[in-house]
Image (cartoon, rainbow, N blue to C red):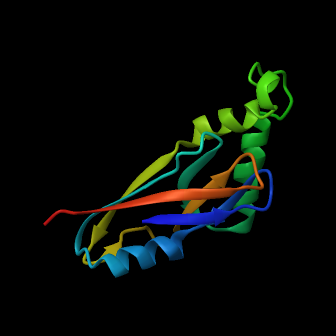
Amino acid sequence: MKLNVKTENRIELIDITAEVREGVRKSGIEQGACILSTRHTTAGIIVNENESGLREDILELLNRLVPEGAGYRHDRIDNNGDAHLKAVLLGASEALPITEGNLELGTWQSIFFAEMDGPRNRTVNVTLLSSK
């Protein structure tokens, strides 16, 4: 399954939890795993709490750790070295269990597509594996 994600800002977090849950539900898998990945080198997949202040804190942290225009060698090519480095910190995939037909997330956990070089049209690959 593939999710299409349209981003609107250069750097943003987009909650894709509902779409992933629906894909798991439609699959009929009772026990297994959900593997989420993106092939984009300037984006990531993360799991964390969907609270507005925390989302802003995450983005501010990334911008502090890897500021835009700080003289990255990759900027000679397309001026987005910071986006690639931020994506390295986040990672391009997550694996989550499926139990009793449901995506197993903690009470406060949500799944985010993390855009570091938008706005763009992006794709998230959702691979569902059954353990039976």
Q: Residue at x 74, y 23 (%)?
A: 74
Residue sitting at x 56%, y 68%: 16
Q: Where in the figure is residue 19, as x and y percent of width and height?
A: 51, 74
Q: Quadrant of the N terminus?
A: bottom left
- The residue at 36%/80% (across/down) is 25
Tell how many labels.
0
Q: Nearer the viewer, residue 96 or 77?
A: 77
130 or 64: which is nearer to us?
Answer: 130
Name the quadrant containing residue 83.
top right
Farthest right residue in view: 69
Image quadrant in which the C terminus is located: bottom left
Q: Position of residue 10 (x, y in %)?
A: 80, 51
Residue 27 vertical position relative to residue 32 in the rendered view, above or below: below
Q: Quadrant of residue 41?
A: top right
Q: Position of residue 70 (x, y in %)?
A: 84, 25
| For residue 10, above or below residue 86 | below
